[in-house]
Amino acid sequence: MDKTQDPNSKKKSMLIATILMMMGLLLSKGSGFVRDIIVGIKFDEVYRDAYTLAFTIPDLFYNLLVGGAIFSSVAPYMSGALAVNEEKRGIRTVSIFVSVISVVMLVVCTLGVVFSEQIYSVYNLFLAEGDKIDPDKLLLAANASKFLFPQIFFIMLAALSSGILNAYKRFSSTAFAPTVYNICVLLAIMILAGNTQSELMHTTAGVLVAAFIYFMFLYILGFSTLKKFRFKFEPKDKEFIFLLKRALPIMFSASIVQLNVVILNMFTGRFGNIIFLFRNANTIWQIPYGIFAVSIGTVMTPHLAGLYESKKYGECRDLLTTSIKNILFLTIPSAGMIFLMSQNVVAAIYQWGSRYTDANVADASVLLRYLVLPIITQSIVHVMNHAFYAIGKTKVPLIAGLAGLVTNPMLCFILINNDFGLKSLSIAYSVSSVVQMIILLILYMRNKEIKPRNIGIFILKSAVCLIVMSFVLVLIEIFIHFGPGKLNSLLSLGLRGVVCLIVYFGMAIVLRMEEARFWLDRFLGKLKLKKK
């Protein structure tokens, strides 16, 4: 049998790719944390909020125009073409897509730079006087964004390069590139940041340079593959129009995520300088989501698209089932630990200087505690979105996203006006995430040939493991106490985290969960290789 057709060989290849993606995302998230820590040290409350706010609108335009389409439409399209030996067709169509989108993005970036102040005024457009964001802060953000609009052009080129390389299953070339970007941004903040408008703008100019380096790093690494794609501005091409129609719902779906961020930031005016704190809470819950759900989903998508294109529906079902179980197995204990240790987690990660006060820790931990549910629900949303993209049903995620987009601001308004305080923002986002998840699962389960199976028993066993883990963590909180100081804070958090993982994995092995044995065998295998 040809080795490339051996199921065991394919599984091993996917496992290696997934581990590479996880390692890359872990480094990316870690360097991203350091970046946010330095932001908290270098900027005061007003300037760190303005810096955070400056990214929101450029990121929205990026997601609206191309962000989601790259990994969820372009990559699956190219993967499908490769699976049926039609590489030339895929290269031609994707080349046209990249060319047309690049021209559109250049126009958008130019308009963003010219009209940044008018664009950022939308934040206070529909709010009562007492709920508005400080106009001076908005002006700072608008001016800083003048370098961030051009930045998204290079981020787009980098993401397109990454999506194409993923379609060719060159995951080792893409896994660590975001870390390079984060390190460059970190250097820009450390060298250029300060509490004046000019220093803020110099910092975002440094971010622009980091985005250019990010793209060039990927392009050089993947040159042998990427050189096949040339500039072809042929917007009337039939295959391009087919791909564009497939991508448009994904573009709108991806923009909904960032629209929700913009909406939530609009409601922060009543609570003072919490935009950066809300970003901190979001960054923390997205660690397990980003490392586990995104890495597994990224590796799954081109394989699932290829299997579906080849009409191997049984293998599609098995792949999606395994992906969901692996994601849940890793995100459920993560959510439990973050919920029970939210204040410790925030303090350990972000409180490195006097500018990040105890009050900041308390506010960020409140926001975080009510954002743990999306660690699980958004992970399911992510993998189900990619499953729909892989089988070509791109409108379904858009429908689910629109439902969440309606739910989010409506709940924000109701909860804030009923004195739920800071947690209103997190609860609104969590509920909207649940709504999206339910819609996606109900609609996907209609596809009987490819729907996932045996998830219910798995969730029940995971819940038992989580309960036992939480009980042990409570006992640790009662009987083990560390003294004051940063080192003790980090040791305390690390010890409790390790104990929780051991307990969770131990219970999973007792309950004979395949996922526990799978990850444990891989971990022990790595240790044996290192000893040899």
Image (cartoon, rainbow, N blue to C red):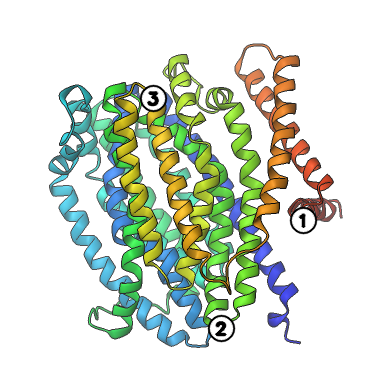
Question: Is disc 2 placed on a helix, strand or loop?
Answer: loop
Residue 118 in the figure: left or right of residue 21: left
Q: Position of residue 333 (x, y in %)?
A: 65, 40
Quarter-wise, where is residue 17 in the image? bottom right
**Residue with the mark numbered 1:** 514
Q: Amino acid at mark 2?
A: Ser
Question: Is disc 3 placed on a helix, strand or loop?
Answer: loop
Q: Please tell me which of labels 2 and 3 falls first in the chain.
A: 2
Indicate which disc residue 422 carries: 3
Q: CA distance from mark 3 to mark 1?
A: 40 Å
Residue situated in front as seen by the camera: 27 or 220:
27
Q: Please tell me which of labels 1 and 2 falls first in the chain.
A: 2
> What residue is at 19 percent from the left and 21 percent from the top?
130
> What residue is at 77 percent from the left and 52 percent from the top?
513
Q: Is residue 298 above or below residue 488?
A: below
Image quarter of the C terminus: bottom right
Question: Is disc 1 placed on a helix, strand or loop?
Answer: helix
Q: Please tell me which of labels 3 and 1 falls first in the chain.
A: 3
**Residue with the mark numbered 2:** 310
Indicate which disc residue 145 carries: none
Q: Amino acid at mark 1?
A: Glu
> What residue is at 29 percent from the left and 41 percent from the top?
262
Q: Is residue 263 visible?
A: yes
Residue 205 in the figure: left or right of residue 525: left
Residue situated in front as seen by the camera: 423 or 119:
423
* Marks 3 and 1 close (CB-CB < 8 Å): no
